[in-house]
Image (cartoon, rainbow, N blue to C red):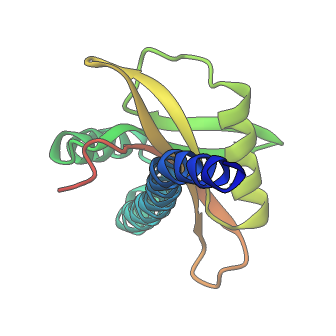
Amino acid sequence: MNKEKRELIYSIVIVIAIPLLVVANTLFISQGIRNTYNTELRRKADGLNAVIAESMREVIVEGDTQAITAKITALKSERPELARLMISEIKNGELVVLAKTDDNHEKLSSSTEFQQKIAYDKKASIAKLTTINTNTGSQQAWEVSTPLLSQDDRTTIAVVSSSVLTTDSDE
């Protein structure tokens, strides 16, 4: 009887363990895929922002804020994954917004301002995953700040900041 009892317990443990291991494996694999997907979306957002920064170089150097606004508005209308686009620079230690497509937020959030100042000072692109409110509700987006460097890469001219929606990035 003792042997039969052990075999019964062993059978029950096996019957319970196999489905639990399948579920755990599925969760582990889906988490890995999600991390890979987010990494790829961040790279795409960073690349898009770098291209935008370079394409805006002439009008930013000229300092024509109306031309900058017109150009970023046109860019935003052409690219549905761009939720926000902003060009800023630092003057006398303060962040000054030259142009932006989002008129709803007059004051920048402290984290966005901090992110742009770091990108400006460190001369490196910085991104964070954030949730933004759009016409269709709350959506996740990569908020990327990319410095536009002078031709000799010694000084930062401006910072191009964009919010790239993760849902529209598949195009």
On the image, the x and y values in percent for residue 156 come to 67, 64
Q: Residue at x 25, y 44 (%)?
A: 168
Q: Residue at x 66, y 24 (%)?
A: 109
66 or 42: nearer the eye?
A: 42
170 or 32: nearer the eye?
A: 32
**Outermost residue toward the front?**
1
Looking at the image, how many numbered discs can be counted on the residues?
Answer: 0
On the image, the x and y values in percent for residue 54 come to 41, 69
What quarter of the picture does the C terminus occupy?
Answer: bottom left
**Outermost residue toward the bottom?**
152
On the image, the x and y values in percent for residue 19 come to 45, 48
Based on the displayed image, in which of its 4 quarters is residue 115 positioned? Answer: top right
Q: Is residue 112 visible?
A: yes
Q: Measured along the vertical axis of the image, is residue 163 above or below residue 44?
A: above
Q: Residue at x 65, y 46 (%)?
A: 5
Compared across the picture, whether 36 is left or right of 117 comes to: left
On the image, the x and y values in percent for residue 165 come to 36, 41
Q: Is residue 160 visible?
A: no
Based on the displayed image, in which of its 4 quarters is residue 72 positioned? Answer: top left
Q: Measured along the vertical axis of the image, is residue 152 above or below residue 166?
A: below
Compared across the picture, whether 44 is left or right of 16 comes to: left
Q: Residue at x 73, y 27 (%)?
A: 110
147 or 34: nearer the eye?
A: 34
153 or 58: nearer the eye?
A: 153
